[in-house]
Image (cartoon, rainbow, N blue to C red):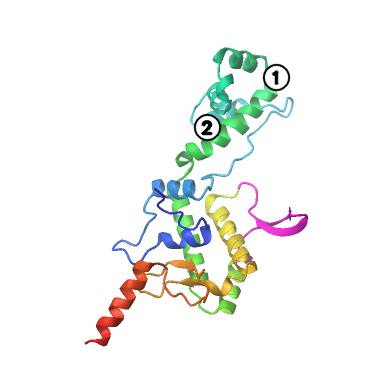
Amino acid sequence: MRQYAETGLVAIDLVNTWDEYLDDPERLPDVASLHRFCQELACRPAALREPERSPETGTLTEGARKATAVEAGDRAPLEDAREAAPVDVRDPAPLEDAWEAAPVDVRDRALLEGAREAAAVEAGDMALTEGDLVAVREVRGRLRDVLAVADPGGRAAALARWASDLPVRALVETEGGVPRLRPAPPDGADLALRLAVRAVTELLDVAAAGDWDRLRLCAARPCRDAFIDRSRPGRRQFCSTRCANRAHAAASRARHR
């Protein structure tokens, strides 16, 4: 059961990890909850860094090999290869022979691209710290400040100010043969920065889709969850049926006092 990925958009689901409707509004109370958020939103907890290589041979240094093994959960490269291989070729003998016969630089590449890539998600909690949690909460605060601006024009200006503070680089992607400019985090960016850049990108996509003025915060206080109004009239005020019913019941009680 998903706990955080209600929309699949970091821009909305991260904002909604602070839920003032709850007695304890903090839905990211610890590193474990942040790890689960990353899993559900398909965010690698830590950016993969290129390890140190020998300038003479181009292969991983001994220190890099040890660090890579730790970040990969100390799983043997052979075990990773077996997991990645199709079922009908998981016989250990051919894999062991192939591994032993492989050139050293091929083994390095397999260790880096296989073990570390897989372990970044499967054992990603090893890469997260309390500092990451604090930084992600700060990103959430900036994002909430942007979405709290009710006027679409003012919200656009707030997004522009926030984006200008981020150290992003520009990527040109092609989609259907059409070039498209996309913001991207710098190499080696930490989790908080990557989430911030992803959130900005998603909000730009929301605007490009014509839904910028349909991006709102729930009107049923104390709830302030973000949502995109997908209704045809475009006049939805509440994030959920729960909040709509609660607001209507409160209004009814007020009228009959």
The amino acid pointed to by label 2 is Ala
Tag on residue 24?
Answer: none
Percent x, y for residue 251? 30, 81
Distance in Å between CA atoms under marks 1 and 2: 21 Å
Residue in front for this viewpoint, 79 or 72: 79
The range drawn in magenta is 163-188
Point out the tag, 1 or 2, that comes first from the N-terminus.
2
Q: Is residue 164 magenta?
A: yes
Does 64 sit left or right of 33 as displayed? right
Quarter of the figure with residue 4: bottom left
Q: Which residue is mark 1?
A: 103
Whether residue 222 is visible here, answered yes or no, is no
Q: Which residue is mark 2?
A: 72
Percent x, y for residue 200? 59, 62
Percent x, y for residue 255? 27, 87
Which type of secondary structure does the marked residue at label 2 adopt?
Answer: loop
Quarter of the figure with residue 108: top right
Quarter of the figure with residue 244: bottom left
Q: Is residue 231 magenta?
A: no
Q: Which residue, as the protein is rendered here, is positioned at the far left? A: 257
**Residue depicted at x 64% and y 33%:** 52
**Residue depicted at x 73% and y 59%:** 180
